Image: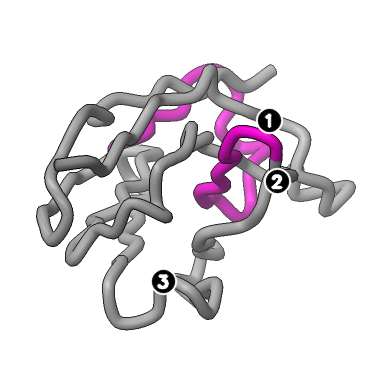
Amino acid sequence: QVQLVESGGGLVQPGGSLRLSCAATGNSGLINTMGWYRQAPGKERELVAKSTRVYSTTYAEFVKGRFTISRDNAKNTVDLQMNSLEPEDTAVYYCNAENRWTGRPEYWGQGTQVTVSS
């Protein structure tokens, strides 16, 4: 199986930056796309950004130009650089990996809290 471990969340002021990191361990050969989702209180979990093994990226419209996803296949890591953070970005951020055989987002990290507040 696959385990995902996240780090890098915290409290930041509006306009500030944070970098989230996620490392995959276990049978990383099961993984295709890796990415980040978020869930704010009272809202559904939503895609933030994702990257395939060949570094094709997808971003949610609400983060374009502010967030950058980067992936290292050799290290089985995926990072999310978040700039110009807004209070609306406050959420629990989850690392995710899709099973390369099913195409489903089967693997999840434990989540890391990001709070944007003055």
Cα separation, mark 3 vs mark 2, equals: 21 Å
Q: Position of residue 103 (x, y in %)?
A: 83, 53
For numbered disc 3, what is the local secondary structure? helix
Coordinates of residue 47 in the picture (x, y in percent) = 62, 57
- Kindly identify the amino acid type of the residue bearing the numbered disc 3: Val
Q: Please indicate whether residue 65 sits to the left or right of residue 103 in the image.
A: left
Q: What kind of element bears circle 2?
A: strand
| SS class, disc 1 | strand
Q: Is residue 41 magenta?
A: yes
Q: Which residue is mark 2?
A: 98
Q: Position of residue 46 (x, y in %)?
A: 66, 53
Observer-side mark, 3 or 1, equals 3
Residue under the point 33% across and 35% down:
114
What amino acid is labelled 2 in the image? Answer: Glu
Disc 2 + disc 1, Cβ < 8 Å: yes
Q: Is residue 75 above or below residue 70?
A: above
Q: Which residue is mark 3?
A: 63
* In this picture, residue 76 sits left or right of residue 109: left
Q: How busy is the neighbourhood of tag 1: few (under 14 within 10 Å), some, or many (20 plus)?
A: some
Among the two numbered marks 3 and 2 on one chain, the one whose residue lies closer to the N terminus:
3
Q: CA distance from mark 3 to mark 1?
A: 23 Å
Which one is nearer the viewer's eye here, 92 or 55?
Answer: 92
Chosen colour scheme:
one colour
Name which of mark 3 and mark 1 comes first in the sequence: 3
Magenta part of the chain = 21-42
Q: Residue at x 23, y 30 (%)?
A: 8
Q: Which residue lies under the disc numbered 1? A: 107
Q: Nearer the viewer, residue 101 or 50?
A: 50
- Cα distance, mark 2 to mark 1? 7 Å
Point 15% across, 40% down: residue: 12
User: Which residue is at the front of the view, 69 or 87?
Assistant: 87
